[in-house]
Image (cartoon, grey):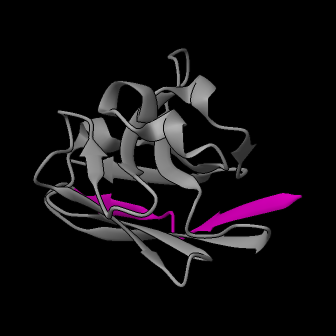
C-alpha cells in the first residue's frame, strides 16, 4: 500500500514562490507515474504537472507552463516548485501516484485525475493580490 502526504502549502502574494513537497511511505518507486493536481471549490480537480517514470519527461498544464516545476528525489519525495504565483493558483494541491507507467505516457493521460490510484490529503495554497 502507498500513502502520500503533502506539505508546504501556505499564503503568498502574487509574484511570489512556493515549494510543495509530497512524502511517500510504502511501495513508491521510480516506475510510478507521479503528478500534482489542484482543486478549488466547485470545480473539478485539475492536472498541474506530471513526471513520467524512467524517462524524466514532464508534462504541465498550459496555465502553469514556465512557472511550475515538478521533480522527484529518491523516488520517495515529490516536489512542485511554483514561481510567479497568481491569484488563479489559489487551490488545494494534491500529489498522486500510479504504478501503471502507461497511465502517464501522454500529457492528456497524465493530467487526468482518473489515471491515478493513490492520493494525498491535500495542502492549501492561497495567493493574494
Q: Residue 27: give x, y in percent of width and height.
A: 79, 67
Q: Is residue 30 above or below residue 113?
A: below
Snapshot quadrant of residue 32: bottom right
Residue 95 place in picture, x, y as percent:
57, 52
Whether residue 95 sits left or right of residue 121 in the image: it is left
Q: Please report the residue visible at 55 percent of the width from the left and 69 percent of the height from the top.
A: 30
Q: Is residue 6 magenta?
A: yes
Q: Tell me which segment is drawn in magenta.
A: 1-13
Q: Residue at x 55, y 15 (%)?
A: 42
Q: Count the marks.
A: 0
Q: Quadrant of the N terminus?
A: bottom right
Quarter of the image where one finds residue 109: top left
Q: Residue at x 70, y 52 (%)?
A: 120
Q: Is residue 100 above or below residue 95?
A: above
Q: Give the percent coordinates (x, y) of residue 24.
A: 71, 71
Vertical position of residue 116 compared to residue 128: above or below: above
Depth check, front residue: 121 or 60: 60
Residue 124 pos. (x, y %): 54, 52
Horizontal side of residue 97 vs 73, given as left or right = right
- Left or right: residue 128 versus residue 99 is left
Amino acid at each position: 500500500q502507498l500513502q502520500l502526504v503533502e506539505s508546504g502549502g501556505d499564503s503568498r502574494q502574487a509574484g511570489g514562490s512556493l515549494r510543495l513537497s509530497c512524502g511517500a511511505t510504502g511501495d513508491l518507486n521510480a516506475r510510478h507515474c507521479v503528478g500534482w493536481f489542484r482543486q478549488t471549490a466547485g470545480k473539478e480537480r485539475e492536472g498541474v504537472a506530471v513526471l513520467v517514470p524512467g524517462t524524466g519527461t514532464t508534462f504541465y498544464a498550459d496555465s502553469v507552463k514556465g512557472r511550475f516545476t515538478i521533480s522527484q528525489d529518491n523516488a520517495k519525495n515529490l516536489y512542485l516548485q511554483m514561481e510567479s504565483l497568481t491569484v488563479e493558483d489559489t487551490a488545494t494541491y494534491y500529489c498522486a501516484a500510479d504504478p501503471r507507467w502507461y497511465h502517464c505516457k501522454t500529457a492528456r493521460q497524465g493530467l487526468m485525475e482518473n489515471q491515478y490510484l493513490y492520493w494525498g490529503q491535500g495542502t492549501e495554497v492561497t495567493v493574494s493580490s
